Image (cartoon, grey):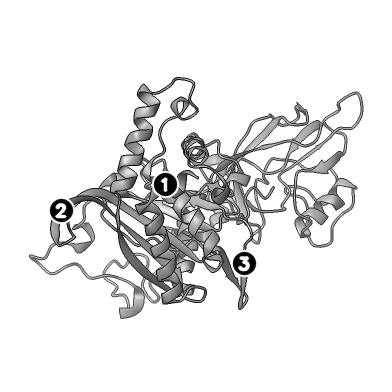
Amino acid sequence: MPRLSDTMEEGTILSWLVPDGEQVSRGQELVEIETDKANMTYESDLEGILQIVAAEGDTLPVGAVIAQIGGGGDNGDPGAPASTAVRQEDGPASRQAEARTAGESPESESPPGGTGSAEVSPAPAEDPPAGERVKASPLAKRIASERGVDLHTVTGSGPGGRIVKADVPANAGQEPVEGASPDDSRATPPPDAGVTPPPAAGLADVTTAKGESTVVELSRTQQTIARRMAESKATIPHFALQSDVDMEACVALRAELKSLAKDGIPTHPVAMHPAPTYNDMVIKACALALREFPTANSSYRDGRLQLHSRVNVGMAVAADADEPAGGTLIVPTVFDADQKSLGEIARETRALAARVREHSITPPELGGGTFTVSNLGMFGTTSFTAIINPPQAAILSVGSLEGRAVVRDGEVQARNTMTITLACDHRILYGAPAARFLARIRELLEVPAALTL
């Protein structure tokens, strides 16, 4: 199982793109894998005959053997010993794979479905031993535990034979009441037998008050997001600062750039590209402010600060929002955003967002972020506080741009205004430095000519 992101710990095989026993070439798309961030396609770095070890639907840790590529000779015999296992880490699973490749029998593990020989059969054993790992969803495992079901006796209907909720028997594992005769339906169970008395007459059954419920399993990406966000709230001492930004100058600048693109000189560089969005301006302002406040561009690790030399701004992008489970949140990175022009940032953010929604984003484009911008203004959200993406020091939330009544020079005026919220890790940023950092972002947005330099 290759490591396809910097935070990936395990992956799920979605589909093999090459049949078992077929010849593969270097650079050929081999397998589609669901990681903690997105669905990725892994390309073969070897040539030879593919021998699949892990089935579709299997979830395995990074470094575990998922296939072998070999066959060495000119005859292309699929039965020839595999030369290399598809892997990317030198862990125990990798060393055992090397032992299998050499025809040795590892002491601590046998190949799936085998007894330590060099040949690895992709077919699962028909009657696995009790201690063998069972392919089942987390929900199916929990329900089986509650019902006392041995998953080794259950046949899975999911991908690759994976056991899902519907496969778990409803009445399995229920023990007969001690002291009661099988024929005696009048036997009274003890109070602790887990029997729920019928509801009192006239009271609605609370178990059906919500109507029929549908359980939707989360994807690997969603599970990782849930875990990381829970860890962030539980382990990072957050605090938030909020500021209103006068966006009149940004509105005027964008209108000018849009006019130039529409009616200006056709050969002018600006006229050849769409005008930057307000979010592009925010990313550029944050990048310049991060360069001036290096502490905000750092991480907290093991009681120390890591000050990063590059300013890489992550951009939160919603993907698959119409899915039953609510879609995912992917954060591609604009690298060296402080050194790029506003137009370069605009073109890059559009391309990154498109690749996220097309599921073609690559692992390098999802890592290396030192700060994150999350914008919900397009949905009419006035303000919100986002959760810090660890191990970053802060995250900026951007609300909607709207006309508001404000007081300027003693008079009430209608001004285009936007609320920004900075959530900070108090171990890295204290109140006063964080307030100065947020004020600098506001200043850059209120005088956006600096963003075009």
Q: Which amino acid does label 2 sit on?
A: Gln
Query: Which residue, given by chain and number where applicable, does mark 2 sit on?
Result: 413
Q: Are marks 3 and 2 in contact (CB under 8 Å)?
A: no
- Residue at 38% over, 28% down: 260
Query: Which residue, given by chain and number where applicable, does mark 1 sit on?
Result: 449
Q: What element carries label 1?
A: helix
- Residue at 31% over, 48% down: 377
Mark 3 Cα shell of 10 Å, populated few (<14), some (14-19), many (≥20): some
Q: Do the residues labelled 2 and 1 touch (CB within 8 Å)?
A: no
Q: Splitting the image into 4 quarters, where does residue 386 fall?
A: bottom left
| Foreground: disc 3 or disc 2 | 2
| In this rendering, position of residue 356 left or right of residue 242 | right
The x, y position of residue 318, in whole percent, is: 41, 45
Q: Is mark 2 on a helix, strand or loop?
A: strand
| Foreground: disc 1 or disc 3 | 1
Does residue 317 appear in the picture of this structure? no
Which sits in the foreground, 315 or 145? 315
The numbered dot on residue 143 is none
| In this rendering, position of residue 13 left or right of residue 198 | right
Which label's residue is closer to the chain start, 2 or 1?
2
Mark 2 Cα shell of 10 Å, populated few (<14), some (14-19), many (≥20): few
Q: What element carries label 3?
A: strand
The x, y position of residue 286, in whole percent, is: 46, 55
Q: Which amino acid does label 3 sit on?
A: Leu
Which label's residue is closer to the chain start, 1 or 3?
3
Which sits in the foreground, 123 or 33? 33
| In this rendering, position of residue 21 left or right of residue 171 | right
Query: Which residue, given by chain and number where applicable, does mark 3 sit on?
Result: 307
Mark 1 and mark 3: Cα distance apart in space: 28 Å
The x, y position of residue 226, in whole percent, is: 45, 59
